[in-house]
């Protein structure tokens, strides 16, 4: 967020010079990504406003109030010149979606679209905005000043004087204002502003081209509204249209801000457009914001911050920030201003007081820690379940919790899987089939796998146990699986690998990354004299299989054919499976055939016969 020093000074006449203000902002408000001095004498601060304060600090007025409170300076509230002769209106506003908390509308007739005043152009350009015309510039000035986005419609382009806020029709298209005249396809979850017949704008994101202001506009409809943060954010991300308005809406603005913004935009137009007539404001306020109260104690603040901050200092901070509070003994009950939607608990108040008090005043000390350890009951159940399944020959796998359908949707993911899983078995079955294909490489005879993890539904999340083999596939809750399970597991502390116990890791097998390339199998059956050990053949395969032989040769079949002549010994057939794989490339049949040819030559020279 670009903040103008001169703009701040209009609110705080005694504002310290820019170089000192930089330190105040850095140590008490947020990081500063850059400071630019303009030729006109203004200084621009590029503030890195985090989401928890975006609802009030993405505005000059919000930053000015913050600085005035920090430095205990006078905050000069603006006085708006408003028209006195207000006409009755035929404007009707309907809200047909729960995602619109408040909608204010005012019709202004007889305006003249033209260049903006010099002061307005200077303010806009100082923070990187391009001047368009006096009406559009006024809406941008209000947004940058108090943080409330505003939109202006050309009234003559609307069908009648009715505004309906609702969800869009599935598949409808809307062409947006802007140089590129981008056209987007909407779905039924997107909120739109309509005239009862067609969509005029995407609520909280951007206006439509057909209802925008131009040089011929005479009558306008001013929109000042409060939209649900999640709805605006989902739409903006889905259509990849991110605007200054959507950035503010998606961080949960207070609906109470609408009244101030309507007065400010009306005052600006009143000053610029003499002779215009103003109709009364229509205000539909469905979800009225309730004032939040937070209680805490001074002892709690001192414990959390780890510093002996006096009650007088706490009270001075509350007074400077215009908090209305009651105190009884050590307890405080604070009325939270509507604009501070981030403060909902005593923890938030501790952070607020600590930030203003100054983290640099808080000494870094390690807290005292109770050495008594208690294992988490859920952890114990999980380890019991794992121990049982491992004893039964199962191996643990981990699958993704994301799905392309489900009951709990997430805001966005790296793929099209925007839901959390409702069961484990779906992906476990896929893992089973994949591992079954890799049996030769895994050097096992049967796939037996399990997973323990969370599943999610509308009522919350639970931990399930799922396991699968060739005979069964089962999924039950962790509680049900361990209900009658009698098995001992070590404590969390005893299960740790502790070097102090003198464990020697020098002889442990070092993990090697597995190859990403496919493997090739070859089965070879050989007649040998009865009584010959299979290890004789296994050694030949290991000697000549080269480093491409990935696993130990596996004997999967053998039988003996007695000799018909009692004076001669019989023959035994040993069938081995060889698995070849390269860590660097995909092997070809020709490469493996050359190895197999050398193996057969050695077998023949040893007096054995390849079947």
Image (cartoon, rainbow, N blue to C red):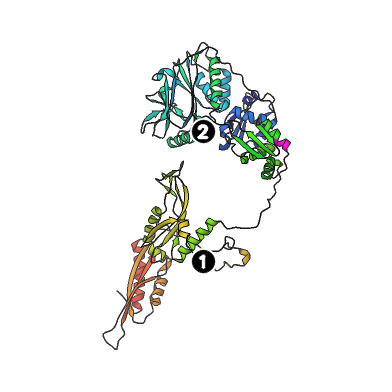
The mark that comes first in sequence, 1 or 2, is: 2
Residue 356: x percent and y percent? 67, 36
Image quarter of the N terminus = top right
The quadrant in which residue 307 appears is top right
**Along the line of sight, the residue nearer the viewer: 592 or 185:** 185
For mark 2, does the 10 Å Cα neighbourhood hold few (<14), some (14 to 19), or many (20 or more) residues? many
Per the image, the residue denoted by label 2 is 247
Residue 536 is inside the magenta segment: no
Distance between the alpha carbons at the discs numbered 1 and 2: 52 Å
The magenta segment is 306-314
Q: Residue furthest top?
A: 275
Front residue (pair 398, 387): 387
- Would you say the residues marked 1 and 2 are in contact, meaning their CB atoms lie under 8 Å apart? no
Quarter of the image with the C terminus in it: bottom left
Judged from the image, the secondary structure of the residue bearing numbered disc 2 is helix
Side of 314 relative to 291 (left or right):
right
Q: The residue tagged with tag 1: helix, strand or loop?
A: loop
Residue 364 is situated, as x and y percent measured from the top left of the image, at 69, 47
Q: 441 and 537: which one is in front?
A: 441
Residue 509: which disc? 1
**Residue 160 image point, x, y percent:** 39, 18
């Amino acid at each position: 967020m670009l903040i103008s020093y001169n703009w701040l000074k209009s609110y705080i006449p005694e504002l310290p010079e820019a170089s000192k203000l930089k330190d105040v902002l850095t140590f008490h408000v947020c990081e500063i990504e850059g400071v630019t001095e303009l030729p006109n004498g203004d200084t621009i601060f590029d503030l890195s406003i985090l989401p928890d304060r975006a609802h009030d600090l993405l505005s000059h007025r919000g930053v000015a109030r913050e600085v005035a409170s920090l430095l205990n300076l006078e905050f000069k509230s603006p006085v708006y010149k408003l028209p006195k002769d207000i006409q009755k209106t035929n404007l009707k506003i309907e809200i047909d979606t729960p995602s619109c908390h408040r909608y204010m509308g005012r019709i202004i007739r007889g305006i003249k679209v033209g260049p903006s005043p010099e002061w307005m152009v200077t303010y806009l350009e100082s923070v990187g905005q391009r001047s368009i015309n006096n009406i559009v510039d006024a809406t941008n000035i209000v947004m940058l000043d108090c943080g409330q986005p505003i939109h202006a419609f050309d009234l003559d382009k609307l069908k009648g004087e009715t505004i309906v806020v609702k969800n869009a029709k599935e598949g409808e298209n809307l062409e947006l204002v802007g140089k590129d005249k981008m056209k987007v396809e909407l779905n039924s979850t997107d909120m739109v502003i309509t005239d009862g017949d067609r969509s005029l704008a995407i609520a909280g994101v951007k206006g439509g081209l057909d209802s925008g202001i131009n040089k011929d506009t005479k009558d306008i409809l001013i929109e000042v509204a409060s939209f649900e943060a999640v709805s605006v954010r989902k739409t903006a991300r889905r259509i990849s249209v991110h605007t200054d308005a959507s950035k503010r809406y998606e961080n949960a603005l207070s609906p109470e801000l609408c009244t101030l913004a309507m007065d400010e935009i009306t005052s600006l137009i009143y000053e610029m457009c003499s002779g215009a007539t103003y109709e009364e404001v229509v205000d539909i306020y469905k979800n009225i914001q309730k004032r939040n109260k937070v209680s805490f104690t001074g002892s709690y603040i001192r414990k959390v911050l780890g510093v002996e901050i006096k009650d007088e200092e706490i009270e001075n901070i509350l007074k400077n920030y215009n908090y209305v509070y009651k105190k009884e003994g050590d307890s405080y009950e604070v009325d939270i201003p509507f604009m501070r939607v981030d403060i909902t608990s005593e923890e938030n108040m501790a952070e607020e007081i600590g930030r203003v008090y100054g983290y640099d005043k808080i000494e870094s000390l390690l807290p005292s820690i109770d050495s008594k350890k208690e294992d988490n009951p859920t952890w114990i159940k999980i380890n019991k379940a794992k121990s049982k399944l491992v004893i039964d020959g199962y191996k643990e796998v981990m699958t993704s919790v994301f799905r392309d359908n489900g009951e709990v949707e997430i805001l966005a993911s790296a793929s099209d899987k925007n839901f959390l899983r409702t069961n484990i078995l779906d992906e476990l079955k896929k893992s089973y089939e994949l591992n079954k294909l890799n049996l030769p490489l895994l050097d096992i005879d049967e796939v037996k796998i399990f997973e323990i993890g969370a599943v999610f539904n509308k009522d919350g999340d639970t931990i399930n146990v799922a396991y699968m083999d060739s005979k069964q596939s089962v999924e039950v809750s962790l509680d049900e699986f361990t209900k009658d399970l009698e098995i001992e597991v070590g404590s969390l502390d005893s299960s740790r690998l502790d070097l102090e116990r003198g464990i020697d890791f020098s002889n442990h097998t070092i993990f090697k990354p597995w190859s990403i390339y496919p493997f090739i199998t070859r089965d070879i059956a050989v007649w040998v004299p009865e009584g010959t050990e299979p290890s004789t053949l296994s050694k030949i395969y290991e000697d000549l299989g080269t480093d491409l032989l990935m696993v130990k040769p596996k004997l999967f079949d053998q039988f003996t054919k007695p000799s018909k002549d009692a004076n001669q010994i019989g023959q035994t057939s040993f069938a081995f499976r060889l698995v070849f794989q390269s860590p660097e490339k995909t092997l070809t049949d020709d490469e493996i055939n050359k190895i197999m040819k050398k193996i057969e030559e050695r077998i023949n020279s040893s007096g054995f016969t390849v079947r």
